[in-house]
Every structure is written in C-alpha cells, then in structure tokens.
C-alpha cells in the first residue's frame, strides 16, 4: 500500500511539531523517519496511524484520503517502543487479542496465530507469558500481534530502543527479513543512524518538525544536502572555503583558516564562500614517501581512539582546525601517538558542497 503525506502540519498549543512535511512511501518499502529526539517523527507516525489528527494537510493510503478514518479502520499494525504486551496473557493470547476484538472465528484465530508465530520464529512458545521471554522474544511477540490481522501498513515506533546493542543488531536483521518476506509497506521511527542505514529502502531526516532530506541511505550519506544532515547522518568535517577560481568542472578554493588551497570537482560553477562536508574515512593518511594526491596537507595528532576495525584520529591542521580522520586496518598501519606529525590527503571528488 502506497502512503502519501501532503503538507502535514501539527501543533500542540503554541508548539509547532510538524511544519509542512510532504513525502511519498512506495508500496512494499521499509521507510524510516530519522531524527533527534523532539524532531516530530513519532508525532508524524501517529498521524499516519490516526492517533493524532493533522491541523492541515492530507494523509492518503493508495491514493485515498484517510484523514477522517478512525485508527481501527485504517488497517495499520502498530509496534510500540514499550511493546505494550499484556503480562497476564500468554504469547498466543497476546497475539490473538486483536483478532478476538474483531470477532474472528476460533478456527481462523488458531490458523492465523500459528502462521504469524512461525514467521517470527516463536512457534512452540505459545503458552509462555511475557515475563518468561527474553527482550528479543517480547519484541517479536509485539511484531506478531501487529502482523496477525494482515495490515496493509506496518508502523514501528523505535521498537529496538529497549534492547542491548548486540540484540538490536540481530533484531533489526530479523525485522528486515520479515518485512521483505511479507512485502508489507513499513514506516519505521528511530533516532539511530546506523539502524536506519542498515534496514531502510529510503530515509527521511526530520529536524524541528521539518523535512531536511529524503533519499536512500547511500544518497543521504554520500551527498548530504546541508550541515545538519552531514553531521547527523554519521560524522563529517565541515570546511569553510573561499572559491578563488573555477575551470572545466574543478574549483580552486582556499581554507579560511590557514593558507591551504584545495581543488574540488563540481558539476556546476562555484564562486564565493562555500561549505563542504568531508567524511572522516574520505581523508587518507599518507605514508612517508608516498605520492600525494591533489589535496595534501599536514597536521598534528591530538588524539587517537582505537575502536577495533579502525583508529579515529583527532588532527590539528589548517591553521587551528580539528579534523576527525578514520584510518582502517590499524593492525597493519600501526597507531600514531599524540603530538606526532601526520600527512593527510583526499581526492578532488570526495568533498560534497552543502548548504548552511
């Protein structure tokens, strides 16, 4: 089922929570609403579910306006952050609850519950109570309860936030597997950037109730539109540069701190002051004697944090700028110490020109 939001606005008193958000979610996609706490993503999800009415704008399912349709008639399944399982009911009865309120026959209840528990790999646990389940199993019960009546749209509000880090990784893979197997349109809310990149077909980044950017995880990561997106979707070094020349798709720009000159590829002419985003892994550490790329410069290591697969350096350079550099394979390269000089470089194709 395709979902479309047209110029949605919502305020609570004087506080504007959603400020003119429009987006389209294709049928069968797992679409994530991503942003910091208080950005409006859960409110937007509840507007889709029908729990909140928008002050303005339209909500459409499959091209049909559903603003006036109550939640229980929208055919959406909701997985809440707290799971909201009934502690006095077994797994079977928790999953069957929605079917019973719809007066489904006992034979159909047994059949549908058995099917959905098999889908989420909980078959054999029907007689257990929530207190007898692990966090991951409770999460799957909540998912099964949302799926059992075959909703057209699945809504998930930070469903993994109560799990430990390792379990979150395995459960997000499980959610993606189930979603793809069933082909159900899913809207997923999270503030975790890695989680959003791992599971999503497309991502919408919200900030202060406004839509900052929408695209595939790769599009948003590799080509952030502005400073907020660049710094929220992973970490980025933001450089202030002044363009001093442009010719044949390449700009010449000088850093505002220090006298370093950089060369940047650009499909359109650049002039005046610009901002560019440079991901930490896009900057290379140059071994002694190595041929330098077009953009090479030196700095001093002020910090080195070993995190297993890489070392995250803090480097003082470009006058008095502190840049973050991620160096892969530290076991082969070794780790530079605080105070050591370091040679850095990046290709002209790497930096992304962004809006303020």
Image (cartoon, rainbow, N blue to C red):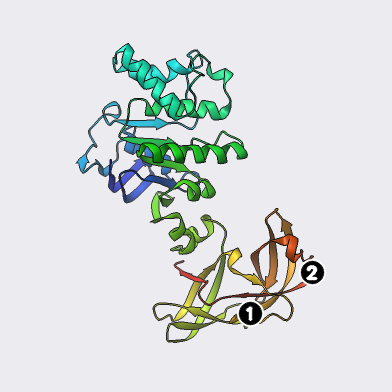
154 relative position to 312: left or right:
left
Q: Nearer the viewer, residue 58 or 219?
A: 219
155 relative position to 62: left or right:
right
Label 1 – label 2 distance at C-alpha: 19 Å
Mark nearer the N terminus (1 vs 2):
1
Numbered-mark total: 2
Residue 12 found in image quarter: top left
Tag 1's secondary structure?
A: strand
Q: Nearer the viewer, residue 48 or 96?
A: 96
Q: Is residue 326 above or below residue 321?
A: above
Q: Assess disc 2: are there few (<14), some (14-19) or many (≥20) residues with their C-alpha within 10 Å of its C-alpha.
A: few
Residue sitting at 43 percent across and 36 percent down? 178
Residue sitting at 50 percent across and 45 percent down? 191
Residue 240 found in image quarter: bottom right
- The residue at which mark 2 appears reads as 339
100 relative position to 92: left or right:
left
Residue 225 at x, y percent in the picture: 43, 63
Residue sitting at 37 percent across and 16 percent down? 110
Residue 317 at x, y percent in the picture: 68, 74
Toward the left, the furthest residue is: 64
Q: Is residue 56 above or below residue 224?
A: above
Residue 148 at x, y percent in the picture: 37, 25
Q: Can the viewer see residue 67 in this picture?
A: yes
- The residue at which mark 1 appears reads as 296
Q: Assess disc 1: are there few (<14), some (14-19) or many (≥20) residues with their C-alpha within 10 Å of its C-alpha.
A: some
């Amino acid at each position: 089922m395709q979902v479309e939001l047209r110029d949605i606005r919502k305020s609570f008193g004087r506080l504007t929570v959603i400020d003119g958000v429009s987006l389209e979610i294709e049928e069968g996609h797992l679409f994530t609403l991503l942003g910091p706490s208080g950005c409006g993503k859960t409110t937007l999800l509840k507007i889709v579910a029908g729990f909140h009415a928008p002050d303005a704008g339209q909500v459409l399912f499959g091209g049909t306006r559903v603003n006036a349709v109550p939640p229980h008639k929208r055919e959406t399944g909701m997985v809440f952050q707290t799971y909201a399982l009934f502690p006095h009911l077994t797994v079977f009865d928790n999953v069957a609850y929605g079917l019973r309120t719809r007066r489904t026959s006992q034979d159909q209840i047994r059949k549908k519950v058995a099917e959905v528990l098999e889908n989420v790999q909980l078959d054999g646990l029907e007689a257990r109570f929530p207190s007898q389940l692990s966090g991951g199993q409770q999460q799957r019960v909540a998912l099964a309860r949302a799926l059992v009546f075959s909703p057209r749209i699945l809504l998930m509000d930070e469903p993994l936030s109560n799990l430990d880090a390792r379990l979150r990784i395995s459960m997000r893979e499980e959610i993606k597997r189930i979603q793809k197997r069933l082909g159900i349109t899913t809207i997923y809310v999270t503030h975790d950037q890695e989680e959003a990149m791992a599971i999503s077909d497309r991502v919408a980044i919200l900030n202060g109730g406004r839509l900052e950017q929408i695209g595939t995880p790769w599009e948003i990561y590799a080509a952030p539109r502005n400073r907020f997106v660049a710094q929220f979707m992973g970490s980025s070094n933001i450089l202030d540069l002044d363009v001093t020349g442009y010719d044949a798709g390449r700009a010449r720009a000088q850093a505002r701190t220090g006298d370093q000159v950089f060369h940047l590829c650009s499909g359109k002419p650049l002039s005046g002051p610009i901002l560019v985003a440079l991901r930490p892994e896009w900057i290379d550490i140059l071994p002694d004697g190595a041929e330098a790329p077009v953009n090479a410069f030196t700095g001093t290591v002020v910090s080195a944090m070993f995190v297993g697969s890489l070392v995250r350096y803090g480097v003082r350079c470009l006058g008095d700028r502190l840049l973050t550099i991620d160096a892969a394979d530290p076991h082969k390269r070794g780790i530079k110490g605080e105070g050591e000089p370091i040679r850095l470089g990046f290709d002209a194709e790497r930096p992304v020109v962004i809006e303020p």
